[in-house]
Image: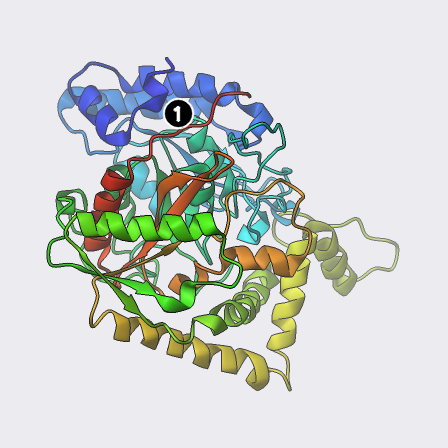
Amino acid sequence: MTELTTLSIADAREKLRAKEISASELTEAYIATVEGGDVLNAYSVKTPEIAREQAAAADKRLGDGDAPSMCGIPIGVKDLYCTKGVNSQSGSNILRDFKPTYESTVTQNLWDDGAVMLGKLSMDEFAMGSSNETSCYGPVISPWRAKGSDAKLTPGGSSGGSATALAADMAMATLGTDTGGSIRQPAAFTGLVGLKPTWGRVSRWGIIAFASSLDQAGPFTRTVRDAAIMLGSMASIDDKDSTSAEIEVPDYEAALTGDLKGKRIGVPKEYVADGMSSEIKALWEKGADDLRAKGAEVVEISLPHTKYALPSYYIIAPAEASSNLARYDGVRYGQRAELAQGDGITEMYEKSRAEGFGHEVKRRIMMGAYVLSAGYYDAYYSRAQKIRTLIKGDFETAFENVDAILTPTTPSPAFELGAVSDPVEMYLQDIFTVTVNMAGLPGISVPAGLSETGLPLGLQLIGKAFDEANLLNTAYALEDTAGFTAKPEKWW
């Protein structure tokens, strides 16, 4: 049973098609690991009966020879994807017991391809956080531990449940979303591949919104090949999402040759941050050498407006959040406060929102309302949007001369739960990732080494818009030379 839960999607696909294993057998193995992993708090809802039904249907398709690549593959779904009849509450009490009557486009695409849902995965409330400590379900715990320590570590955020579930072999792949690094940072912290596609490549319909111009759905997988397989199933042109790009989905897996001859990889000088640890810098340099060994030319580039990205992001994202979250008022669904005699509709709104939202969400709603208010809109929001245009322009200029960009994913390995209490210090976790969201580009984190304390470290590759095929191929080459195979020792 244990061996089944360590297979990659690609390996499981071959065994399923060859009838060496069945989807039902594979699913039962994962249901057992999910049941044994409660201490990690990765799953907010378990759906074993749904999984068994989907696995039986997948076995029939496999028997009939009608088996897409994701057919029979057991996955976990981040809590902000709407899944029909299954709790989808974005880690928040304001949406307590919300069961959608519809399916998000991404999950429907996966179910249409025969994937199997093991359950919903915990996350920072409304995807606001970098450590998965703001969830109404409580913190998610990483399966990794530092050498000689029993301290509980963060799996990163906001997709911490997605990262922990996969790293602990409680799913074969998982769904996340990335607004400022919420796929790539947890992937780096837990030794996984995490892909944020181009904004518009994957439909956002049926995904509970945080910041609509920044949010993007993507996969967590064990390998780059698996990421290519899963993205091919997730991505589609969607009439229900007006921001979905009308660009046909290519065969991402077919692009994985590992050949980088003639490719140029940019290393931005502005990403050498003050106080960058020697091990992160050494990992970055080794990554550049690894890409050279695959035939690429590595050159220094400049992204001059990088230093403005983080403050601009933390104006734009809260502004959009304050608008998106205005709909949660206690009227139609979710949390509604108990009212006192004489309370009216205004008191109901105020009390329901005060009780339903957590501290970090309230903080960002207030920040967003402030920067959008009369007298401050031009000083903050309008200026941040102009800087965003400049950041996008920096990347466009860089990509005239390079095919991809290499950076660290995070400024450090995973930290202890509760170790970061200052909100600004927590926001700095996104320093290497937010530029990708601001520019709407694809980015991928690849596990590339271990820290001095034995914890995973990741490298980030950034690609041209809608050029996920070449980005994945570059990541495939980096993965091959990095040769990362470490897994956490089971203690849970």
Indicate the quadrant containing the N terminus: top left, top right, bottom left or bottom right. top left
Asked where in the image residue 191 lies, by quadrant, the reply is top left
Which residue is denoted by mark 1 in the rendering?
51
Q: Is residue 95 visible?
A: yes
As drawn, 338 above or below 138: below
Does 453 sit left or right of 29 as displayed?
Answer: right
Residue at figure coordinates x 46%, y 40% from the top left: 451
Residue at figure coordinates x 36%, y 72% from the top left: 303
From the viewer's side, name the closer residue of 241 and 451: 451
Residue 370 screen position, x and y as percent = 65, 74
Q: Is residue 329 visible?
A: no
How many numbered dots are placed on residues in this image? 1
Does 7 sit left or right of 84 as displayed?
Answer: left
As drawn, 62 above or below 380: above
Residue 186 screen position, x and y as percent = 47, 44
Indicate the quadrant containing the C terminus: top left, top right, bottom left or bottom right. top right
From the viewer's side, name the closer residue of 290 and 316: 290
Asked where in the image residue 353 lies, by quadrant, the reply is bottom right
From the viewer's side, name the closer residue of 429 and 43: 429
- For disc 1, the neighbor class at 10 Å (few under 14, some 14 to 19, many from 20) is many
Residue at figure coordinates x 22%, y 62% from the top left: 246
Residue 235 screen position, x and y as percent = 27, 50
Residue 286 screen position, x and y as percent = 32, 48
From the viewer's side, name the closer residue of 31 and 334: 31
Residue at figure coordinates x 17%, y 42% from the top left: 253
> Which element carries disc 1, helix, strand or loop?
helix
Identify residue type, mark 1.
Ala
